Image: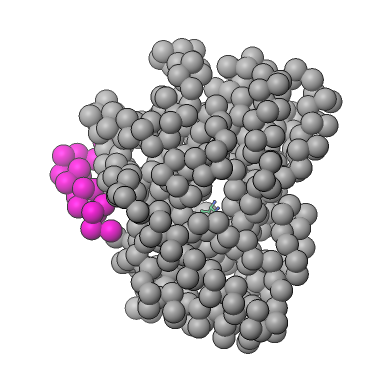
């Protein structure tokens, strides 16, 4: 019996997060034993060039010695105290320095927890119950946000989950990404009732969909006009597009930012932060309750701080983009050489190919991608030793550990894979 078969006896679906199960691409998942730099290796010793990067956190590659060493050092001092530490102050200061709209921050243990708590805060601050999200955007799996969601929820065709009471979900309005008119229509139907608009500034859970030129600025304006809290979910884009995240990259400032993935350096972390006057409403300074035994965990904060220090080095993002550009240009060229006009979205070190002609600028465009073709492409790449997200509605991540040789091999594998599956 394989590890995965046996896992299915003890863990639902054999996985601890659904999209890992290869459900939408078929076959059994690769069971990972370890990783180093740009590579992961499986239990049979096969090595792969990895573009999942743990779904985003491993921006400097796997088992980065600069991260591992501080984690080992922190572990020697104890793995959890349930009390304040200097490391929490250090990482909070660093986040506030890198993301200027964040004047105060609370560290939690996952992106889901960050979003769930940030929504509570936004509702308390605005003294309104309704929130607005966008179809296909994914903000973790809390009840209020698992409504027309992206990522695994979309992959498994359950964008709104059973078990979420309709009474909870009715407070979540769903607009269309890149369609400010859909936002305005919902706002006029719910005048004075919306506490918060939350958005992935680059949608990364319906594949990768970039904001149109004015979309984020238009959201900012609508929120200002209507007294609504603008929340950027930067769990994917934070510290990925730029040191200051998508808000720095696109020049639009939210009131609250949620973070995760990269700020944990691969350990379980989330965070939410924003304007001081909003954050001061958090308990114990204010009345909005949130707590966690492992919040600000010493291993996670040590790893996160080491990661943020690395990302603060001059030219980190410039060099990463140079690397990603070679790869993404090569992949785009492959399509041209093969006479294929698939939609290919990219920004900095993130990209996504959609098996659909033309462009993908909306959720409905993304839904037109041929997911069966993605599955074939995924397996053709896997056979050639390249790991991609095992689902169409996710992003491809490049790390600073990817070498010129990795990139050359990937472009070649991509060409052969596309050719094979036509
Ligand atoms: N929600 C993640 C993708 N956007 C999946 C995380 C995982 O399975 O590890």
Q: Is residue 170 magenta?
A: no
Quadrant in which residue 163 is drawn: top right
Q: Is residue 72 magenta?
A: yes
Q: Quadrant of the C terminus?
A: bottom right
Quadrant in which residue 283 is drawn: top left
Residue 305 position (above or below residue 50): above
Q: How is the image coloured?
A: one colour
- Image position of 106 (left or right of 372): left
Quadrant in which residue 43 is drawn: bottom left
- Image position of 22 (left or right of 364): left
Q: Nearer the viewer, residue 232 or 284?
A: 232
- Image position of 298 (left or right of 60): left
Residue 41 position (above or below residue 208): below
Q: What residue do we see at 26% from left, 52% from top?
A: 67
Q: What residue do we see at 19% from left, 39% from top?
A: 78
Please name the predominant secondary structure of the magenta segment in the image.
helix
Task: Where is residue 106? Give x, y as percent.
Answer: 41, 28
Q: Nearer the viewer, residue 236 or 123?
A: 236
Q: What residue do we see at 72% from left, 59% from top?
A: 360
User: Can you see residue 136?
Assistant: yes
Task: Where is residue 266? Give x, y as percent.
Answer: 36, 51
User: Can you see residue 42?
Assistant: no
Task: Where is residue 337? Give x, y as percent.
Answer: 64, 83
- Counting every numbered tag in the picture gives 0
Residue 308 position (above or below residue 328): above
Q: Which residues are magenta?
A: 64-80
Task: Where is residue 265? Give x, y as percent.
Answer: 35, 49
Residue 296 position (above or below residue 39): above
Q: What residue do we see at 42% from left, 66% from top?
A: 323
Residue furthest top as drawn: 286
């Amino acid at each position: 019996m394989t590890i995965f078969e046996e896992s299915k006896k003890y863990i639902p679906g054999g996985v601890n997060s659904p999209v890992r199960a290869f459900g939408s691409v078929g076959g059994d998942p690769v069971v990972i034993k370890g990783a180093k730099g740009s590579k992961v290796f499986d239990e049979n010793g096969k090595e792969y060039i990895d573009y999942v990067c743990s779904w985003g956190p491993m921006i400097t590659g796997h088992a980065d010695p600069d991260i591992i060493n501080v984690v080992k050092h922190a572990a020697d001092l104890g793995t959890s105290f349930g009390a304040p530490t200097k490391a929490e102050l250090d990482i909070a200061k660093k986040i506030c320095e890198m993301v200027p709209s964040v004047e105060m921050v609370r560290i939690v243990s996952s992106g889901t927890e960050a979003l769930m708590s940030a929504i509570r805060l936004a509702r308390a601050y605005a003294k309104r119950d309704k929130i607005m999200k966008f179809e296909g955007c994914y903000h973790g799996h809390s009840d209020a946000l698992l409504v027309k969601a992206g990522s695994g929820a979309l992959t498994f065709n359950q964008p709104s989950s059973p078990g979420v009471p309709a009474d909870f979900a009715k407070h979540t309005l769903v607009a269309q990404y890149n369609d400010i008119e859909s936002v305005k229509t919902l706002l006029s139907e719910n005048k004075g009732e919306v506490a918060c608009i939350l958005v992935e500034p680059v949608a990364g859970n319906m594949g990768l969909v970039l904001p149109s030129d004015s979309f984020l600025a238009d959201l900012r304006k609508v929120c200002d006009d209507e007294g609504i809290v603008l929340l950027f979910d930067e769990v994917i884009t934070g510290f990925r597009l730029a040191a200051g995240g998508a808000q720095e990259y696109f020049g639009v400032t939210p009131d609250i930012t949620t973070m995760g993935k990269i700020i944990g350096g691969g350990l379980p972390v989330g965070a939410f932060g924003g304007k001081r006057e909003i954050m001061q409403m958090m308990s114990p300074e204010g009345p909005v309750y949130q707590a966690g035994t492992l919040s600000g965990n010493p291993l996670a904060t040590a790893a996160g701080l080491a990661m943020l220090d690395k990302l603060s080095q001059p030219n980190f993002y410039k060099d990463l983009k140079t690397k990603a550009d070679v790869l993404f240009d090569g992949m785009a060229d492959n399509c041209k050489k093969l006479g294929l006009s698939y939609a290919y979205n990219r920004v900095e070190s993130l990209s996504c190919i959609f098996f659909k002609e033309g462009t993908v600028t909306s959720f409905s465009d993304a839904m037109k991608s041929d997911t069966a073709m993605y599955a074939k492409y995924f397996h053709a790449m896997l056979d050639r030793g390249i790991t991609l997200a095992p689902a169409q509605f996710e992003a491809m991540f490049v790390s600073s550990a990817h070498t010129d040789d990795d990139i050359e091999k990937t472009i070649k594998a991509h060409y052969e894979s596309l050719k094979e599956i036509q």
